[in-house]
Image (cartoon, rainbow, N blue to C red):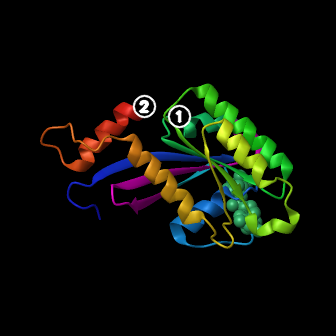
Amino acid sequence: MARPGNKIIQAKMVLLGDMGTGKTSLVLRFVKGQFLDHQEPTIGAAFFTQILSLTEATVKFDIWDTAGQERYHSLAPMYYRGAAAAVVVYDISKMDTFTRAKKWVEELQRQGNSNLVMALVANKCDLEPKREVETEEGEQFAQENGMFYIETSAKTAENINELFYEIAKRLAKAFPSKPTGMNLNNEVRDRRKLSCCLG
Ligand SMILES: Nc1nc2c(ncn2[C@@H]2O[C@H](COP(=O)(O)OP(=O)(O)OP(=O)(O)O)[C@@H](O)[C@H]2O)c(=O)[nH]1
Ligand SMILES: [Mg+2]
């Protein structure tokens, strides 16, 4: 629950990345605390919600988990348009998924939302013996593109909460804490702020 005076931010978040990189698994770990060894490929996209309470704000995430298969690529703009945060995922054990992640970042940048909070997620870090993408490569690409970099495992839950907390913190920072609306409850007021700022 939000404390009095604590701002509420409703934020659209999108997950992008090659098929099988673990997008759905990351979201299911965060939202439901579960992991499936045989997660079905996503068809089109899936929608989830989750609330995170920080000291400075309560963030309500509307999460669009897109399908990585190439045939769904053309749907992606529907999901990243108007997003406040984008999570681009690759699998550390497959170099081609890192190549695909770079393409998603380029596509997001062509959309020109400079306020977008972007995370580069190197998932499946439990597969260290099969690693094909070195930490430094991911870190460097993230740094060059104004993203934050994090290594996760949906399987072991490593860094999953950290990923979403970091995004929430960055979103909270991006929104001014002084209320501007009149006679509105926090939620309506902050929704207005978001719709004006995030398009
Ligand atoms: N070892 C390991 N396997 C994982 C991890 N995350 C996901 N997987 C497995 O990788 C496979 C694909 O995971 P999904 O979450 O379906 O991947 P996705 O990115 O949503 O795939 P699409 O929906 O097709 O785009 C599943 O069998 C998962 O169990 C992880 O961190 N470690
Ligand atoms: Mg999926």
The residue that label 1 is drawn on is: 81
User: Does the segment drawn in magenta span residue 33?
Assistant: no
The residue that label 2 is drawn on is: 199
The magenta region covers 48-73
Tag shown at residue 5: none
| Tag 2 and tag 1, C-beta contact below 8 Å | yes
Which of 120 and 80 lies nearest the eye of the viewer?
A: 120
Q: Main secondary structure of the magenta part?
A: strand
Q: Is residue 40 visible?
A: no
Q: Is 169 on the left or on the right of 140, as rendered? A: left
Q: Residue at x 12, y 42 (%)?
A: 183
Q: Relative to 23, say whether 111 is above or below.
A: above
Q: Residue at x 31, y 37 (%)?
A: 193
Residue 28 quadrant: bottom right
Residue 72 quadrant: top right
Q: Quadrant of the N terminus?
A: bottom left
How far across and how far down the image is residue 178, in percent? 23, 42
Q: Is 51 on the left or on the right of 132, as rendered? A: left
Q: Amino acid at mark 1?
A: Arg
Q: Amino acid at mark 2?
A: Gly
How far across and how far down the image is residue 99, in percent? 80, 42
User: Does the segment drawn in magenta span residue 72?
Assistant: yes
Distance between the Cα atoms at labels 2 and 1? Answer: 8 Å
Q: Residue at x 50, y 39 (%)?
A: 83
Q: Determine the secondary structure under disc 1.
A: loop
Q: Determine the secondary structure under disc 2.
A: loop
Q: Relative to 128, say whether 121 is above or below.
A: above
How far across and how far down the image is residue 33, in percent? 55, 72
User: What is the number of callouts on the image?
Assistant: 2
